[in-house]
Image (cartoon, helix red, strand yellow):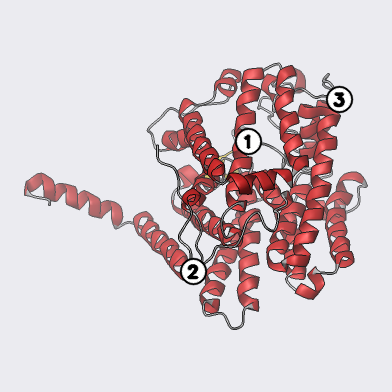
């Protein structure tokens, strides 16, 4: 292949790039990831090809948008925040999201009967999304607000693709594997060997911030939280399956990934995600015992205790000593100051500013607020909903939470294995939103919350039959 003087020189350059600590580490990680997929294989599980759509969606949300990746590798221009950039967005990213959404809608149209049953069983969620669409009408930025609502519909579409899969439990497992097996190990790789990508520095203090594949430490913490819970769920399922032929392989895979998650937690310095992981892990472990999972009173007590542990430092100043021990203060790193300031901003308390519109005008930026940086969230999911959708949005969200919890409890009684993960994700959505914007569009926490809260009618999604061929709607439509 390589001939002559120039061919040999090119070959030597390739060898120099590969035979370096960074090159060797990259090869080792790549082989390790392939090994994880090989060990986790299950040939009996048959999921639709359309599952790649939510997989790609989660890859993007769990790392960075395509335009930012191109800029990181010198193939595009890095965009700093500005009002115009926030309003216009990236055409490249917009086209990619649009393509994924269009393919997803086509898949759901082909699964029309299942989708219809799913929507009828989840009227509160449908009403919430319809109200979000209506709020575009009174937004000061209706075009941007409508675009963001379309993305929010994309979140729902991807969740529905998973829940209408012929074998939804296998689909959830495969989705977590396809995304988590890449996001977690590769985050470690870039932190250790590609610091220009995985490590940032605070412009004000020059403090090192570990971000991995994401844009900030809280996003890295969310990856550890959500996929760590998935790995723990799979590990416990394999541990209980004493007679399973794949038991040892699955224990090795998910035990290894759990160890990676804990290493990332130690670097990310995201205390909200770590606390939520501890609380939700306790629920997964407890509900992994079927007899315990079917006792509604016990489950209710465990959930109430988890919510209390997360909420007491916020509302009753209980546990502030523990906050100082883990490196936090009573203001939750300035969050309480932001909460006071946003509540003082003049907005409609009943209807809100309009879907995802409140922060478009940069209301807390500028010298009069004593800030040189951009504030783009309230660091509280409930407050975020109030600012954008008002008390009407809060009430609709409360109905979604109550009905979602009822759905999860019903699932626990019928299927403790699947119900345990859904309960953990629901509680994560509730507790994470105490100090972060968990109910926000294009958020992994929001998507997992929807995955947990949506009720799936028993007969609307039959388990995949081993004897039949894949249905027409199991194939991703071609352009």
Of labels 1 and 2, earlier in sequence is 2
Question: Residue lying farthest top?
Answer: 140
Residue in view at x 80 percent, y 75 percent: 291
Say what secondary structure mark 2 lies in: loop
Question: In the image, is residue 131 above or below residue 291?
Answer: above
The image shows residue 34 at horizontal and vertical percentages of: 41, 63
Question: Residue lying farthest right?
Answer: 316
The image shows residue 137 at horizontal and vertical percentages of: 72, 18
Identify the residue position indicated by label 3 in the image. Answer: 350
Instruction: Answer whether residue 207 is visible to the viewer in this image.
Output: no
Question: Residue lying farthest bottom?
Answer: 243
Identify the residue position indicated by label 1 in the image. Answer: 153
Q: Quadrant of the C terminus?
A: top left
Point out which mark residue 42 bears.
Answer: 2
Q: CA separation, marks 3 and 2?
A: 51 Å
Of labels 3 and 2, earlier in sequence is 2
Report if the CB atoms under discs 1 and 2 are less than 8 Å apart. Answer: no
Say what secondary structure mark 3 lies in: loop
Please state if 260 lies on the left or on the right of 314 as rendered. left
Q: CA separation, marks 3 and 1?
A: 23 Å
The image shows residue 346 at horizontal and vertical percentages of: 83, 18
**Which corner quadrant of the image does residue 208 belong to?**
top right
């Amino acid at each position: 292949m390589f001939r002559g003087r120039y061919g040999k020189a090119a070959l030597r350059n390739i060898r120099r790039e590969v035979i370096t600590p960074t090159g060797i580490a990259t090869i080792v990680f790549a082989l390790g990831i392939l090994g994880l997929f090989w060990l986790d294989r299950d040939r009996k599980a048959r999921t639709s090809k359309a599952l790649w759509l939510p997989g790609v969606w989660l890859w993007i949300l769990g790392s960075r948008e395509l335009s930012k990746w191109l800029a990181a590798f010198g193939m595009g221009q890095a965009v700093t925040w500005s009002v115009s950039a926030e309003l216009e967005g990236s055409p490249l990213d917009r086209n990619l999201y649009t393509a994924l959404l269009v393919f997803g809608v086509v898949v759901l149209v082909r699964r029309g009967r299942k989708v219809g049953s799913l929507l009828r069983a989840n009227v509160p969620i449908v009403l919430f999304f319809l109200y979000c669409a209506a709020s575009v009408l009174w937004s000061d930025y209706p075009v941007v607000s409508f675009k963001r609502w379309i993305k929010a519909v994309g979140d729902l579409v991807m969740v529905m693709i998973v829940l209408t899969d012929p074998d939804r439990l296998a689909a959830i497992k495969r989705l977590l594997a396809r995304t988590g097996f890449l996001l977690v190990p590769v985050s470690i790789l870039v932190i250790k060997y590609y610091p220009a990508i995985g490590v940032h520095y605070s412009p004000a203090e020059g403090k090192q911030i570990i971000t991995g594949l994401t844009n900030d430490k809280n996003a890295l913490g969310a990856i550890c939280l959500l996929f760590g819970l998935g790995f723990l769920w799979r590990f416990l399922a394999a541990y209980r399956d004493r007679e399973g032929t794949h038991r040892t392989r699955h224990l090795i895979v998910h035990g290894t990934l759990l160890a990676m998650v804990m290493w990332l937690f130690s670097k990310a310095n995201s205390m909200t995600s770590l606390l939520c992981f501890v609380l939700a892990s306790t629920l997964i472990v407890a509900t992994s015992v079927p007899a315990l999972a079917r006792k509604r009173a016990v489950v209710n007590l465990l959930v109430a205790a988890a919510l209390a542990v997360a909420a007491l430092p916020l509302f009753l100043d209980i546990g502030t000593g523990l906050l100082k021990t883990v490196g936090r203060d009573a203001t939750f790193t300035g969050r309480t100051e932001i909460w006071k300031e946003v509540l003082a901003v003049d907005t409609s308390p009943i209807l809100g500013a309009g879907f995802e519109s409140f922060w478009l005008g940069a209301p807390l930026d500028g010298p009069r607020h004593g800030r040189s940086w951009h504030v783009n969230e309230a660091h509280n999911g409930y407050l975020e909903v109030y600012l954008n959708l008002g008390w009407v949005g809060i009430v609709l969200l409360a109905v979604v939470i109550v009905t979602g919890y009822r759905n999860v409890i019903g699932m626990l009684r019928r299927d403790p294995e699947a119900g345990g993960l859904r309960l953990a994700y629901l509680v994560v959505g509730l507790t994470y939103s105490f100090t972060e914007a968990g109910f926000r569009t294009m958020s992994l926490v929001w998507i997992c919350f929807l995955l947990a809260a949506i009720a799936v009618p028993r007969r609307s999604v039959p388990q995949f039959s081993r004897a039949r061929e894949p249905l027409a709607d199991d194939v991703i439509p071609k352009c």
